[in-house]
Amino acid sequence: LVSLGNLEAAVSLLLSTPPEGTNFYPNALRAVVLSSAVSRSLHELAVKVVAANMVRTDKSLSGTHLLCAVGKYQEACSQLQDAGCWIDAATLAATHLHGSDYAR
């Protein structure tokens, strides 16, 4: 798909890898990198999908790092809270969130 120039379909195919599969992590990272060549919105979407799948498979900190890389600190904080990582969530909130986002 990449050689045909259909980058969006390639990203979609990579993101369809089941999180339980052995190829999930490499394909997830490929999808994130490839999506950045298409558009910022696709890149952010790919990061959100990968991060959510990482949380589902107990790799929440890796997903948090990806969310922070695209400036989605509130979502990263929420995922840390959902995973019970309260100290990490509080640290992230104190360093990157303000106003109502911080209060949440």
Image (spheres, rainbow, N blue to C red):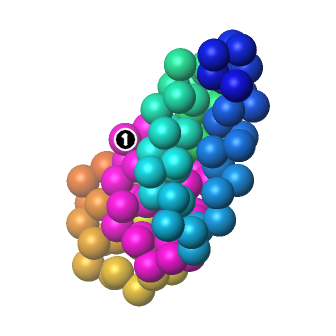
Q: Which residue is mark 1?
A: 69
Measuring 31% from the left and 49% from the top, which residue is drawn there?
Answer: 96
- Please, which residue is most extreme toward the bottom here? 84
Nearest to the observer: residue 14 or residue 65: 14
Residue 74 in sight: no
In this picture, is 9 found above or below 28? Answer: above
Residue 63 lies within the magenta run: yes
The correct choice, above or below, for 33 with respect to 98 in the image is above
Helix, strand or loop status at disc 1: helix
- For image coordinates 26% across by 78% down, the residue present is 87
| Foreground residue among 104 and 10 | 10
Q: Residue at x 64, y 57 (%)?
A: 17
**Quadrant (top left/top right/bottom left/bottom right) for the N terminus:** top right
How far from the left and from the top, in percent, is residue 46?
60, 43
Circle 1 crowding by C-alpha within 10 Å: few under 14, some 14–19, many from 20: few
Name the side, left or right, on which 28 lies relative to 16.
Answer: left
Whether residue 82 is situated above or below residue 12 in the rendered picture: below
Q: 13 left or right of 58?
A: right
- Residue 71 in which image quadrant: top left
Q: Which residues are magenta?
A: 48-72
Question: Could you tell me residue 60's position as x and y percent?
Answer: 42, 70
- Is 14 on the left or on the right of 58, as rendered? right
